Structure formats: C-alpha cells, structure tokens
Image (spheres, coloured by chain):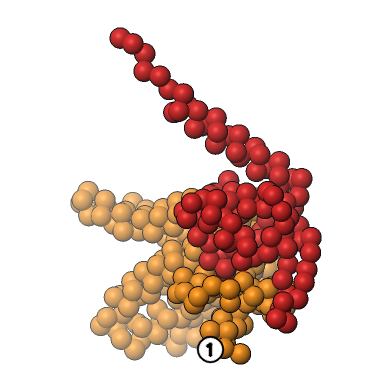
Chain colours: A red, B orange
Amino acid sequence: MREPTYFILAALQDEPRHGYAIIKQAELLSRGRVRLATGTLYTALDRLTTEAYLQVVKEETVNGRARRYYALTPTGRAALQAEASQLASAARVVTEFRVRPA
Amino acid sequence: MSKIERRYARLIRLYPAAHRAARGPEMLDALLQSPFRLREVRALLLGALRAHAAHDDVSPRQDWLTAVRAAALMLLAAGVVSRAVYVVQPFLSSAETAGNLAVAALGLAALACALRGRYLLSALGALLTLVASAFWPVFDIALWGLWGYPFAILLLIPLRWFRPGRASGVLRYLPLLPVVLVLGNQLFSEVFPAVSGILQGGANVGVVMGALLWLAVDERVSMAVGLYCLDTLFVGLVYMADGWTSLPAMVLRLVVIGVPPVVLLAAAAGRNRYQVTP
C-alpha cells in the first residue's frame, strides 16, 4: 500500500470525514510528511470508493456546495489493519535487533 | 465569486462533464478551505488528464492487453498508410499501382477486423497482406510498414483468447500516430529534402519523449508506443544482419534503436506496478 493511501485510510479510523478534513488529518497523522493536494485526494477517493475501501456515509450542503463524508468499509479497515501489521513486523526487525556479544 | 474560486472553477472545468457533475462542487469546497497553491493547480491539471484517460483498470494484465491491441492497430495502420502513399506515385505502372492498391486494401481489411475485435481474422488478413506483398514488392518507406505485419500478427493472436480492456483517452487515437508519422515523413522528403532525415529523427524522438511524459497520465500509452518501437528494433536488426558493417557501428546502431523501446517498456511496467498498488 502506498503511503498516501495508508494515511487517507488511517485518517478515517475514528470517524467519517470530508475531503479537506481528510487532508488535514492525514498531514497530522503523518507528522507533515503526507501533504495531499486536493486533486490528488479526489483521484485517490474515487479509486478507494471503487475498490470498496471507502463509502460515502453523509452528504450536506455548505455555502451552496456539496460536502460528502467518507468512512472506512469493513474491507478498508481490514486492509489498513493488515498493512499496519506488516509495517509493524518490518519495524520489529530493526527495533528488536540486538548485537550479539562477541 | 472570489478570484481564487474563479481560478479553481476554471481548472475543474477541465475535468470530463460527468466527473465535474459528480465531484466538482465537492472539490471546490475542499480547495477553498486552504490558500491558493501552485501544487493544487498541478494536481488538478494532472487529475483532469487522468480523468479523461479514464484509466480505471487495476489489473496489470488487462493494461498490457489493452496496450498490445493499440500497438497492433498502430502497426497495421503503419502498413496500410506506407503502402497507400505509393498508390498515388506517378512513376509507377498501372499494374504496380493496382498491386499497391490491393495490398493496401488487404491491410485495411485486417485493420478493420482488429478494430471490430475480430483478432484472429485480423491476423489472417495481416498474413494475407504479407503474402500479397511478395507479389508486389516494395522498397523504401513502404518496406518499413511491411515489416510491421509479422509483429502485428504475433500481437493479435493472443487477443483472441485474452480480451483487452476498453481503450480510452489518447489510447483511442494512437493508431493515427503512424499515419501522421508516415505522411509527415513523406512531406519532409518532398518539401525539405536536405534535412528530411533530421526532421524524421526529431519527430520520432518527439513521439518517444511524449510517450515517456504521458506515463504520468496513462502508462498504457507508453506501453503501446514502446511495443510499436520494438518493431523498429527488429527491423533494424534485420537491416544490420543484411548489411554487416564494423562492430562498433553495429553496437551504436543497436543502442540508438534499442534504447527507446526498452526504456519505454521498462518505465511503463514500473509505473503500472506502482499504479495498481492501492
């Protein structure tokens, strides 16, 4: 899974969010490393919705414009968990490394 | 409407109408919550191009099959047009003109079959065109088109069993590229005979560079152009085998004609693997 996708999914772990809120949350969770442009985010949202990782759960109108809220689907949550486990086990290879005494 | 809103609205208008209707207001809402940034402009331009390319296949195999079909169509189109330009040459006898016309018509039938998804019939048509070419031999530019048929047959046969995906965006118009190149080369030879070689080379480099840049939008285009260029590598090898020169000259020639397809295909394969990762 690509890093931006990982943080887009991670941004929706706790609650459904709209586009701009996903951008800000992904930036926060990644400590500023993932700064998504809006065009890039919506390309990713289209794809993740098609792949059933995300779904639109709420829609409202703000200043005459539609605002959709996205949430993780069970498939999306499972994919995120699987990726996190894989990253964690890869990290353990380094963090639990002990130099053997000579 | 503010100045920034107008700017963003203009950029969103670049997206296809259906996409704009479904996403436009929502995107504008997200864009207006942060200050105007150039990287947003770049992302919107690229997003609009990608949306027009409608590259929604997530299977690398399907992407390759779609590119294989486009490359086969390009090779067939090159064969037809490079023969067709000979139909109108005044120095040919009426029998030769009729022969060229027959070969071009056969090639056109093969192209029409491929366009309609009758790939096995198209491969058979390409084979017949190749056989007919033996009765009306050609030289110069038409020979290049002729060499495309064997490779086109190789590309067409698997498509009978493994159906390619839907061609969209630039990929739909790619079979016109060899037509433009062949006619352009003819034009260069007649209008600027002294520098026609340089102009033809420049046009080919331009096509390769364009296909490389298009990787950012739709890698299937780069795959198709790479496969099409692969045929010129085979032709080059045949020419080299025919006219053996010094080893360094052969190596240099091989590098010049081999690098574009190898780079295009490798870059497209890499990009495709990246694209299909969620």
Q: Nearer the viewer, residue B6 or B120?
A: B6
Callout 1: SS = helix
Report the number of numbered marks. Answer: 1
The chain under label 1 reads B
Q: Which image quarter: residue B196?
A: bottom left
> Which quadrant of the rendered structure holds the C terminus of chain A?
top left
Direction top: furthest residue: A102
Query: In percent of the image, x 46 and y 70: which residue is there?
Result: B39
Image position, residue B52 (x, y; %): 62, 73
Image position, residue B4 (x, y; %): 53, 84
Visible in this render: residue B86? Answer: no
Q: Which image quarter: residue B104?
A: bottom right
Answer above or below: position of B207 versus A99.
below
Query: In percent of the image, x 78 and y 68: which residue is there?
Result: A59
* In the image: residue B152, left or right of residue B115: left
Answer above or below: position of B174 versus B236.
below
Q: Give amino acid for label 1.
A: Lys
Answer above or below: position of B16 versus B160.
below
Query: In percent of the image, x 55 and y 30: which residue is there?
Result: A89
Residue named by callout 1: B3
Q: Nearer the viewer, residue B169 or A11?
A: A11
Visible in this render: residue B1? Answer: yes
- Rate crowding at label 1 as few (under 14), some (14 to 19) or many (20 or more) other CA atoms within 10 Å: few
Image position, residue B187 (x, y; %): 40, 85
Image position, residue A31 (x, y; %): 48, 51
Q: Nearer the viewer, residue A38 or B89?
A: A38
